[in-house]
Amino acid sequence: MGNVIMGHADLISNKERGNSLFLIVLILIVAVFLFGFFGLAAFLKRRDRNRTVDDLTRFMFSHPERFSLTIIQNDQILLNHNGSKMFPLASTVKILFLLAFVHEVRKNQISFNDTVSIIEIDKFYIPNTDGGAHDNWKSKENIGQTVTMKEVLIGMMRYSSNACTDYIYLRVGKDNIQKIIDKYLPDNHTPVFSINSSMLVAPYLKKYKKKKTKEISGYMKEMKQKYFMDISGETFDALVHGKAAPLISSLPSANHIEIQKEFTRKLPSSSSENYASLMYRLGTGDLLSEVEKGLLDEITGPPNPQAENRIWYKGGSTLFVMTSAIFKETASDSISLAFFIEDMNRLDMLWIDHVYQPFLQKITTEPLFRQQLIADLKDKL
């Protein structure tokens, strides 16, 4: 009997040792995996931090299909790589919102000096969706309880506040913004809508269409553009009337990266040749009066402009695209450019984000860099 008990005990002991050994091996495997994962993450972060403008130019040579760049100087198109290719614009489309506002001022429908309570702007604010743009505008511009429309436009253009943008969209009206597109960019431009409220389409689908989070990206991918825009209109109305809180609160749970990718693809889209041409015409032509150009200097130019130079800029980005349109004028040159780049896998966008602005700075301010880049792109692509 004792031998039976001892044998049974040995079996239990062996089983426990086996389980313990398995657990130790499993822990070691997990530890090695975590060490490797975080080690790789640290390496990639360090590598990305050391990327330069030269890395971006090499990326452009290696992936010519993933960017478009149009450069116009002194009435000549110097480069038009993938100029007609359509890209999601992100916040660069806000240029058209500003132009629509200028046209409404001409018709005496609105004024740059009109005032509005900041409460009316803040009701369009969706937390954690604009990279701090709205808060930066309020703090750096010392925004009080009442703001002028000019200050709201600065919030939209210089700081890229989406809340300011939605308020301009409300005051100017979708139809009037669309008229600007039809007038100035009749080709290769998809219809405009509220890009701020469209971020609430995913939680709308989750709440009202009972879609599970894992289903939403696929559903959005197959969704007709008009349906997406219609829902964006409903969520915009919810923001206007203070009824969007349930959608805003559920946004974090309906904001998976695949959903954001499909959201990006639904945004208003156009081409670099469209936006480079528009910026050049605005700066050098008679589309704007000299007074209006002066106002654009104040609204979309740098906070402390150089007296001898004029520079207008608007850029935009999502996790998957970066876009920009620029006009610069000096005593000797007029130059415009539009540079759009996409990375739907997001493997490169993490580091491109760090060098994108330095690249734009070099291409607009350093003639030798610009000339060499144009020559290299024409030669290699």
Image (spheres, rainbow, N blue to C red):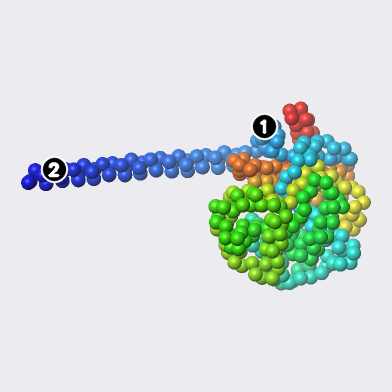
Point out the image quarter for the C terminus.
top right
Give the residue pinned by disc 2: 7
Residue 350: x percent and y percent? 61, 44
**Residue 237 figure quarter:** bottom right
The crowd level at tag 2 (other Cα within 10 Å; few <14, some 14-19, many 20+) is: few
Q: Circle 2 sits in a helix, a strand or a loop, which is it?
A: helix
Residue 284: x percent and y percent? 89, 47
- Which of pointers 2 and 1 lies earlier in the amino acid sequence? 2
**Residue sitting at x 65%, y 46%:** 320
Do the numbered discs 2 and 1 sit on residues whose CB atoms are within 8 Å? no
**Does the image show residue 98?**
no
Instruction: Name the disc covering residue 62, or none.
Output: 1
Instruction: Name the disc covering residue 16, or none.
Output: none
Residue 79: x percent and y percent? 80, 36
Residue 122: x percent and y percent? 68, 67
**Most foreground residue, 284 or 182:** 182
**Residue 51 figure quarter:** top right
Give the alpha-carbon distance from disc 2 to disc 1, as whole Å: 69 Å
**Most foreground residue, 308 or 78:** 78
Q: Amino acid at mark 1?
A: Ser
**Residue sitting at x 85%, y 37%:** 77
**Does the image show residue 170?**
yes
| Pair 2/1: label in front | 2
